Amino acid sequence: MRLLVSTVIAVFCCGNLHAQAVPDAGKFLPGPPAETSVEYIKDYLQYAWGKTMRGTEIGEQARNDFNADASYYLDAFSQAIDVSLNAAETPYIAELFEYCMEYGNKSIQQAKASFAFFRRPYVRFDEVSLIPEMEEKYRDESSFPSRESLMGWMYALLLTEICPDRQDDILNLGYRFGDASISTGYYWDSDVQAGRLLASALIVRLHDHTGVNAMINSAKAEYAKVSGTTYESPALTEETNQYFSENQLPDAVNYLPAPPDTVSALGTTDMSKFIEGKGIRPTDEGQIAINDVNNELDYFLQIYSTPFGRTLSATATPEVYKLCEAMYLLGDGATRSCKNFYHRSRPFKQLNEATAYPPAENIEKNTGSYPSGDSSTGWMYALVLSELNPEAEEALLARAYQYGQGRVITGYHWQTDVEAGRLVGAAVYARLHNSDEFLKQFERAKKELDGTLGVRAISADVKDADTYTLGGVKVTEPTQKGVYIQGDKKVIR
């Protein structure tokens, strides 16, 4: 009863998310691959791999994961954090899982409606799945994107905020939910990739509701109590003025798989995407990719200004700039341990070919390729800016997706580097919500965009000055309540 009452209160207090409020993946993801594409061949080869996993621990996990409810995910993540998560012992975490699952399901349904029908693997090849008893139920339902992939990664991002001391174990399990789903025969690899990216977009929407944020804060306090852990938000780093140092961020070595071998299905896809990218270079899309080799903060804000709907810069939006400046190094920094661990050769170096932008080759040639730090940074910024302006989320994520693909087109990264980089960016986004400094600056940036930063009541020194709207139009006597400029100050009338 407590769980039900608390959830109802949260729904009414935060303004319940409506179906149209969930992110529309059709506006920022490319959708299922065509059956004539190299991505589809990769999907087939991954499907063949998945079938070999059915008699293993991965296959058993996949069977249990399929169509699971919130209590199942609670139990699964209990093993990752060594704390029993359930409605009786951790009611706040349990209610958060229940609430978010509803919108995970709505996001999946929205995505299925936005993309062309994609036949499930077992249907496409008229074969038996891992779960034969469910085949008729799902035969006529599109597989894109993977529900299990979305749910696993969504809960992992939420728990990264709630249990920062176990972030790597949590993210590792969240990632495995997606990989395991391939072995059921119900999902393709492209379904899984899309599910994870949609999960990160949904987390942003959930953060836009004060009731959900209150639920997360209650869950944090509950975890600290039952686990006996204490967490102190770090101050800005002294040397770099960032919200976190690199060793405080999720370590991608611990939650992402190793980069694929050259002779594997994913390695073959990487090579094909590199060749495809070379053909794009002479086009307008190729020129955008060449421009996007620029990874400076000012450039990120420049390219995101159009989808955001207003100019973002140090002069136009100084509080937004401060917010982004203090996390500039984190997207790439969160990839560095993984880059150094695997030291995967970049495409242009391994193949001894020129990139589309040679001036950067000497800087990049001796650094690891996996995961892509630029893709991570681009996705991280898009998520944070989307939380500032949820109405622009799909447009921002579409531009961030394009930015990452530009690294493949120019020859600086393999496709799997970019896909892994986006997940690192999402993990950093979740981690940022453990920083009090980030949250305080976020509120200042939000007020700046809302026009309420530094707003004050009319005082004697400006009461006789001319009054203007925020758009610069002089008014004799304001007829509507709102924020105006009087003298050199913003005032409330």
Image (cartoon, helix red, strand yellow):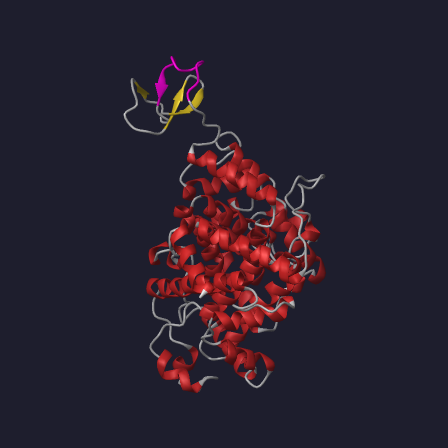
* 361 left or right, relative to 202: right
Q: Is residue 268 visible?
A: no
Quarter holding the N terminus? bottom left
Residue 150 locus on image (x, y percent): 48, 65
Residue 416, quarter of the rendered image: bottom right
Q: Main secondary structure of the magenta part?
A: loop
Foreground residue among 51 and 45 = 51
* Residue 65: image location, x then y, percent: 50, 75
The residue positioned 36% from the left and 15% from the top of the image is: 466
Q: Which residue corresponds to the image point at 55% horizontal and 57% vertical from the top-left? A: 219
Instruction: Specify whether residue 306 is in view.
Output: yes
Q: How many marks?
A: 0
Residue 285: x percent and y percent? 44, 50
In reply to whether residue 460 is colored magenta, the answer given is yes
Q: Position of residue 324 (x, y in %)?
A: 56, 41
Residue 76 within the segment the image draws in magenta:
no
Comparing 279 with 11, the one in front is: 11
Residue at image x 60%, y 50%?
Answer: 434
- Name the one closer to the observer, 458 or 146: 458
| Residue at horizontal 48 percent and vertical 45 percent from the top | 385
The magenta segment is 458-468
Q: Residue furthest front?
A: 1
In the rendered view, would you say 403 is above or below 132? Answer: above
Which image quarter is the C terminus in? top left
- On screen, residue 358 above or below 134: above
Question: Which residue lies most toward the left here?
Answer: 479
